[in-house]
Image (cartoon, rainbow, N blue to C red):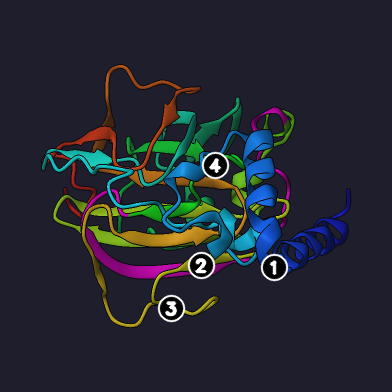
Amino acid sequence: MSAPLRRALSHATGWCADRRIPTPLRPFVYRTFARFTGADPSEAQLPLHGYTSLGAFFVRRLAAGARPIDERADRFVSPCDGTIQALDRVDGDTLLQAKGHSYSVRELLGGADEGVPLDDAWTWTIYLGPKDYHRVHTPIAGRLADVRWIPGDRRSVAPKVLARKERVFATNERAVLRLESDAGPYFLVMVGALNVGRIRVVGVEPGGPPSGMARFERGAELARFEMGSTVVLVVPAGTPLPDTAPGQPVRLGRELGCLDPHRTGAPGE
């Protein structure tokens, strides 16, 4: 499928997802969607008839308490629900591995990493499937210093498709968020994909920069996908938990790794 056709398909999918569903039909439509995808509608903040469209249900907020946030200061948490697709260490400040393919981590970050040494930084690639909660939250409290909106393709990032592709993450449309924390800077990359034409960042106009340095506490809502995709988390000060491995499901708020105060990722460290 050509790039223009993928983009047209993404726009068409978004248009269909935004169509208003008559109130009496909503519970049936959303329960049918949940049955086919594995989503759990019982976690939704609103009753099912409160979501005007499939798109609104897709980006539903969760009921209070559905995702407890690990508050230990020496840990950071998963920013989203999903499946760990890859867990890798940056080699030589340049390469990141995913599904056996190498690509430039600096190309992925699109310049947002200026001044930050990335050699030996750990990266977590988390795939969000149709069943998953699609809002992304802050894994480490910090200030949103930069958002880079990088145009690109909209190829699928589904695991079975990604295994056949090269450099998808570094060439797909994406938003790169740089946050400054007490443990040093870190990056959260929202990677667009087929049928994912809209990435939203809290308090930031699409395509624009953040206004000031808004602070986000651990577990605060930071961004969302309007349809599913992938998050790549790059944490220079982070190390993975010993039992973490690709293929594992993760949930928002659960511990994802440890923070090492001696590996801040700040210049000169």
- The answer to whether residue 27 shows anywhere in this view is yes
Q: Position of residue 11 (x, y in %)?
A: 77, 65
Query: Are the residues at dot 4 and dot 3 in contact (C-beta closer than 8 Å)?
Result: no
Foreground label between 1 and 4: 1
Q: Residue at x 25, y 42 (%)?
A: 68
Which residue lies most toward the bottom here? Answer: 211
Q: Secondary structure at mark 3?
A: loop
Q: Which residues are magenta?
A: 138-160
- The answer to whether residue 152 shows anywhere in this view is no
| Residue 128: mark | 4
Q: Earlier in the sequence, mark 1 or mark 2?
A: 1
Above or below residue 119? Residue 60 is below
Query: Mark 1 — residue?
Result: 18
Report the Cα–Cα distance between label 2 and label 3: 12 Å
Q: Nearer the viewer, residue 113 or 168?
A: 168
**What type is the residue that disc 2 sits on?**
Arg
**What type is the residue that disc 3 sits on?**
Pro
| Residue 209: mark | 3
Is 141 part of what is drawn in magenta?
yes
Q: Nearer the viewer, residue 234 or 220?
A: 220
Q: Residue at x 53, y 57 (%)?
A: 59
Q: Earlier in the sequence, mark 4 or mark 3?
A: 4
Examine the image and state in which quarter residue 167 appears: top right
Report the Cα–Cα distance between label 4 and label 3: 25 Å
Report the Cα–Cα distance between label 1 and label 2: 15 Å
Examine the image and state in which quarter residue 23 appears: bottom right
Q: Secondary structure at mark 1?
A: loop
Q: Secondary structure at mark 4?
A: loop
